[in-house]
Image (cartoon, rainbow, N blue to C red):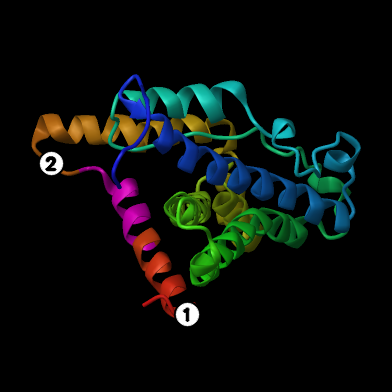
């Protein structure tokens, strides 16, 4: 994509304008979906705190959503990582805590896949957009497709507190689910280790240890191609 407009610390304002909106929408809908499904299944915690909302300010974490991704973007890091404020869910309030935890966890990634599907379908409407805006809209749709699929795939990694970790805890037998659930307080440290420290160690040893990023990129590419195929864009 050709950069246009003024630049801010090496990043064009045009680039920011076509990434920020899709990112905010993806995060907001992801978190709101968790709260909505939890509310429907018996837990009103997020509902009472106003977190079942499409207001992005309810979900944005100043450091995790803005500062950390911004630093990684500005320093041209090999990966982009960030997070929103997690929607609070008291799983004990759910009608069937163990299986309902799975549905609550799946709500976010499923919502992101639906948003990606809508973005892919919307490519067919670009002919209706004025010529002076069509490239900006197209870039927003492209980035919405990419961001939502990445969020869905990354969050389904089986590491608590990611959604995939909670799905695994809900579906695995107790002998495996209990020790996996105990990793939740250390989940962020584990992610930093496998996303940053392990590849750095591998580069010193002459090995490619960037395993998680490789898996996410591969699965993301496959899902994007599948969505483009089923929506008639390939």
Given residues 13 and 24, the one toward you in this image is 13
Looking at the picture, does residue 26 appear above or below residue 41?
above
Q: Residue furthest left?
A: 206
Closer to us: 60 or 206:
60
Which mark's residue is nearer the viewer, 2 or 1?
1
Residue 141 lies, in percent from the top left, at: 49, 56
Residue at position x 49%, y 69% from top?
Answer: 127
Residue 116 rendering spot, x and y as whole percentages = 53, 61
On the question of residue 203 being in view, the answer is yes
**Residue 211 appears left or right of 162:** left
Which residue is drawn at the image coordinates 59% and 48% (left, top)? 26
In the rendered image, residue 1 lying in the magenta stretch gets the answer no
How crowded pointer 1 is (Cα within 10 Å; few <14, some 14-19, many 20+) is rated as few
Residue, x 86% and y 34% (percent of image)? 49
For label 1, the residue is 230
Residue at the spot of label 2: 207
Instruction: In the rendered structure, find residue 3 and report the number of the disc placed on it.
Output: none
The disc, 2 or 1, on the residue closer to the chain's N-terminal end is 2
Query: Horizontally, is 224 left or right of 112 in the view?
Result: left
Q: Which contiguous range is marked in magenta? A: 209-219
| Secondary structure, magenta segment, majority class | helix
Disc 2 to disc 1, C-alpha distance: 37 Å
213 part of magenta stretch: yes
Name the quadrant of the C terminus.
bottom left
Q: Quadrant of residue 185?
A: top right
Residue 17 point in image, percent of width and height: 49, 37
Identify the secondary structure beneath mark 2: loop
């Amino acid at each position: 994509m050709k950069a246009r407009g003024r630049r801010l610390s090496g990043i064009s304002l045009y680039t920011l304008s076509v990434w920020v909106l899709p990112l905010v929408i993806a995060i907001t809908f992801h978190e709101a979906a968790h709260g909505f499904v939890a509310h429907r299944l018996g837990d009103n915690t997020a509902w009472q705190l106003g977190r079942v909302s499409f207001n992005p300010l309810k979900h944005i974490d100043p450091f995790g959503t803005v500062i950390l991704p911004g630093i990684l973007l500005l320093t041209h890091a090999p990966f982009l990582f960030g997070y929103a404020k997690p929607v609070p869910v008291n799983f004990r309030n759910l009608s069937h805590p163990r299986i309902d935890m799975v549905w609550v966890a799946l709500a976010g990634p499923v919502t992101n896949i639906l948003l990606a599907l809508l973005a892919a379908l919307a490519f067919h409407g670009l002919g209706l957009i004025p010529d002076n805006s069509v490239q900006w809209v197209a870039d927003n749709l492209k980035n919405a497709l990419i961001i939502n699929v990445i969020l869905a795939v990354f969050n389904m990694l089986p590491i608590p507190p990611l959604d995939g970790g909670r799905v695994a805890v809900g579906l695995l037998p107790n002998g495996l689910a209990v020790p996996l659930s105990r990793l939740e307080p250390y989940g962020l440290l584990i992610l930093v280790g496998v996303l940053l420290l392990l590849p750095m160690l591998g580069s010193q040893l002459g090995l490619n240890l960037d395993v998680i990023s490789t898996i996410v990129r591969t699965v993301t590419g496959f899902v994007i191609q599948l969505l483009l195929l089923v929506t008639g864009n390939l």
